[in-house]
Image (tube, rainbow, N blue to C red):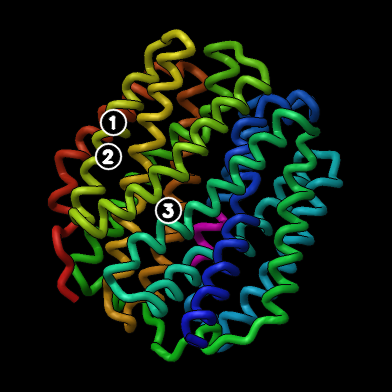
């Protein structure tokens, strides 16, 4: 019973940290036009607050598994949550985009440990038959927080999108200070990223994660600007549409967990990428508001089901590889996403329609290849 309570406490704290780092991600994407107007800059320059977070996050995700050998996961979580609280508070107070971008780099660095450490701990605490659902719940917390951030973006000044996650992180750090658990210890397994690249199955899975993240975030991180420029929506309408996406994300992340556990990880990946390809190609055309909502829901459903499938596959490997895999998973997702966002920024400045059509075709090609990249059952 004590072990069960300890697992529950640790898992709740993981979800709280995930909520803190996720609170403003979607809301800032939705608010790029508003932030740009307030700071008297272009939307493309304003959009750099996304890339300046994602790329450092991706690179920094690799350091947390090695650090977990030298320091307890509890210490790492307390330190990063305190630093996250401070940097977000400063982002809210700064008046120039240049200084905000510098701080966003720091925010990305200190945020990067939450997902890899979370996936390592989920893999350690729960048996294989439950992991898909626990991964789904873990990421669902981020969607609930993101929805709160989106609602706030429609009703308050954008600077509150930094104040609130700062407060959440501070609370998480205090609760971690008061928590003792045998699971929040140093990792004993030796961290060596080279061993991952000796496994051909893992190389294929990580290649898939890199490609899908690069393509998907080249679309979704521009949706706020897309809705403002192509459809002429105001901030309230854009935030409402992002809210719908976030609500669907909560449901579909958990549905993805059920599908991953009961039908298979590969099935979730296939279904997810097929829906992503369809939704992205449809975004290249202009429709009425109702059809646009349906398309956005297709896009959200595809990402969340596929995301769960790929994430759950990675928790199935031996504990000896779990630390390296968790770090590489976050690193490749965010680095690839940041690069994808930056590259597509060049093309969306000319045409959203042609950019989304091209990405949709590439997603369809990836759908045809996914069976060669994601194993039906991973033997580890």
Q: Is residue 281 left or right of residue 168?
A: left
Q: Mark number for residue 273?
A: 2
Q: Residue 74 location, x and y as percent?
A: 61, 81
Q: Is 183 placed above or below 299 here? A: below
Where are the magenta residues, as a range?
A: 56-61
Q: Mark 1 and mark 2 in contact (Cβ < 8 Å)? A: yes
CA neighbours of label 1 inside 10 A, class few (<14), some (14 to 19), many (20+): many
Q: Mark number for residue 210?
A: none
Q: Residue 324 location, x and y as percent?
A: 38, 74
Q: Which residue is mark 1?
A: 277
At horizontal 45% and vertical 60% (from top left) the residue drawn is 331
Q: Mark number for residue 333?
A: 3
At horizontal 69% and vertical 67% (from top left) the residue drawn is 172
Q: Which numbered mark, 1 or 3, is in the foreground of this view?
A: 1
Q: Is residue 214 left or right of residue 258?
A: right
Q: Residue 20 location, x and y as percent?
A: 65, 56
Q: Mark 3 and mark 2 in contact (Cβ < 8 Å)? A: no
Q: Is 6 placed above or below 151 here? A: below
């Amino acid at each position: 019973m004590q072990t069960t309570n300890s697992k529950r406490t640790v898992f709740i704290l993981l979800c709280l940290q995930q909520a803190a780092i996720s609170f403003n991600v979607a809301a800032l994407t939705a608010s790029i036009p508003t932030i740009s107007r307030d700071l008297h800059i272009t939307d493309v320059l304003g959009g750099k607050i996304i890339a300046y977070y994602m790329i450092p996050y991706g690179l920094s995700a690799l350091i947390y598994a090695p650090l977990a050998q030298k320091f307890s996961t509890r210490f790492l979580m307390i330190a990063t949550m305190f630093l996250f609280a401070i940097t977000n508070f400063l982002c809210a107070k700064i008046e120039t985009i240049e200084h905000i971008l510098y701080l966003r780099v720091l925010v990305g660095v200190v945020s990067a440990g939450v997902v890899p450490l979370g996936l390592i701990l989920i893999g350690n605490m729960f048996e294989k038959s439950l992991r898909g659902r626990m991964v789904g719940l873990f990421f669902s917390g981020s969607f609930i927080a993101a929805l709160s951030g989106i609602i706030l973006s429609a009703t308050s000044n954008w600077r509150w999108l930094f104040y609130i996650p700062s407060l959440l992180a501070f609370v998480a750090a205090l609760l971690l200070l008061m928590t003792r658990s045998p699971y929040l210890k140093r990792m004993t397994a030796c961290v060596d990223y080279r061993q991952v690249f000796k496994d051909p199955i893992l190389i294929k899975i990580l290649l898939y994660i890199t490609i899908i993240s690069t393509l998907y975030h080249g679309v979704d991180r521009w949706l706020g600007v897309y809705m403002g420029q192509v459809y002429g929506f105001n901030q309230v309408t854009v935030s409402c549409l992002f809210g719908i996406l976030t609500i669907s994300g909560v449901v579909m992340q958990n549905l993805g967990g059920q599908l991953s556990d009961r039908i298979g990880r590969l099935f979730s990946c296939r279904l997810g990428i097929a829906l992503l390809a369809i939704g992205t190609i449809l975004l290249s055309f202009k429709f009425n508001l109702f059809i646009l909502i349906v398309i956005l829901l297709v896009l959200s459903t595809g990402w969340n089901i596929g995301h769960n499938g790929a994430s759950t596959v990675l928790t199935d490997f031996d504990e000896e590889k779990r630390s390296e895999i968790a770090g590489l998973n976050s690193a490749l997702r965010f680095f690839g996403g940041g690069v994808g966002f930056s590259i597509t920024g060049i093309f969306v400045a000319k045409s959203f329609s042609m950019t989304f059509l091209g990405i949709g075709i590439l997603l369809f090609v990836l759908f045809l290849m996914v069976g060669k990249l994601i194993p039906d059952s991973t033997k580890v």
